[in-house]
Image: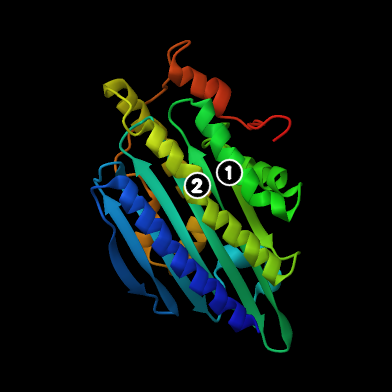
Amino acid sequence: MAHANLEDVKVYLLDLQDRLCDALQVCDDKASFREDSWERAEGGGGRSRVMEDGGVFEKGGVNFSHVFGLQLPASATAVRPELAGRSFHAVGVSWVLHPHNPHVPTSHGNVRFFIAEKDGEAPVWWFGGGYDLTPFYPELEDVRHWHQTAFDACIAFGSDVYPRYKTWCDEYFYLKHRDETRGVGGLFFDDLNEWGFERCFAFQQSVGNSFLEAYLPIVERRRNMAYGERERNFQLYRRGRYVEFNLVWDRGTLFGLQSGGRTESILMSMPPVVHWEYGYQPEEDSAESVLYRDFLHARDWLGEGA
């Protein structure tokens, strides 16, 4: 039963990767994804798809992976010691998009499934995933659309689901060493199994399927906005926060590296060009200062009546 469920999830995830790539290529209208297939010596592999220097996206990646083995990496058993001694399968699709235009937000998402097994015991499984938005310039219209789409993806599964996973996203994508959120959040969920397999799987699909509806209208609205050296420099500076989070705090990066995943694919999420500036402070009352003041902290973006 467990492996039949795993195969159903894998079929969905491979199809999701295809649909994301097809839609993003149409949106970009210049670059196309190149694919690398890879194998993991301990078991499993994946297919990585990356586009670079496109019409919209300076870099974008949509990766599928399925890794398995007889023993979990330390990053997993440290959090879940009861999984020690179990074999495992981890399957997922992750994506990240770094646009050229600073007025178009960076975005990241993933959906995944994990199962651990041991002879004579029931399998342990769960779903995880979500998506988040990292704008460089403050556009309330965009953020409300993003969160409304996330709300709509959750509502059929309970009125408490969006607020719970929105809060989890705010708390997860938080740079403790900077005392700021990475962006404006979205959804984050993990260890999801309390609804039973079919309903949990349906929720994962609702989240994965809603990403393009959440992101592409924002891209179309902002892709042709004018920008200059100031905006580009601020974008490159803020991209540094993205790198800091992924290398310091992200559990998925750590799991991938410790489980022997393909390093090129794991670090695909990194932006192509970044810079750090010592002691940066935005000018008072500038758009950059509004981002810091009003956008880089947890906030109810939908308000009453969402």
In the displayed structure, would residue 21 be above or below residue 276? below
- Quarter of the image holding residue 46? bottom left
Going from N to C along the chain, the mark reached first, 1 or 2, is 1
Q: Is residue 256 above or below residue 66?
A: above
Q: Residue at x 63, y 31 (%)?
A: 301
Q: Nearer the viewer, residue 129 or 26?
A: 26
Which residue in the structure is indicated by mark 1?
A: 149
Amino acid carrying label 2: it is Glu
Estimate the x, y position of residue 12 in percent, counting from the top left: 51, 69
Crowding near the residue tagged with mark 2, few <14, some 14–19, many ≥20 C-alpha atoms within 10 Å: few
Quadrant assignment for the N terminus:
bottom right
Amino acid tagged 1:
Thr
Disc number for residue 195: none
**Which of the labelled discs sits on residue 213, or is there none?**
2
C-alpha span from label 1 to label 2 = 7 Å
User: Is there a contact, CB below 8 Å, between mark 1 and mark 2?
Assistant: yes
Secondary structure at badge 1 equals helix
Q: Position of residue 233 (x, y in %)?
A: 31, 27
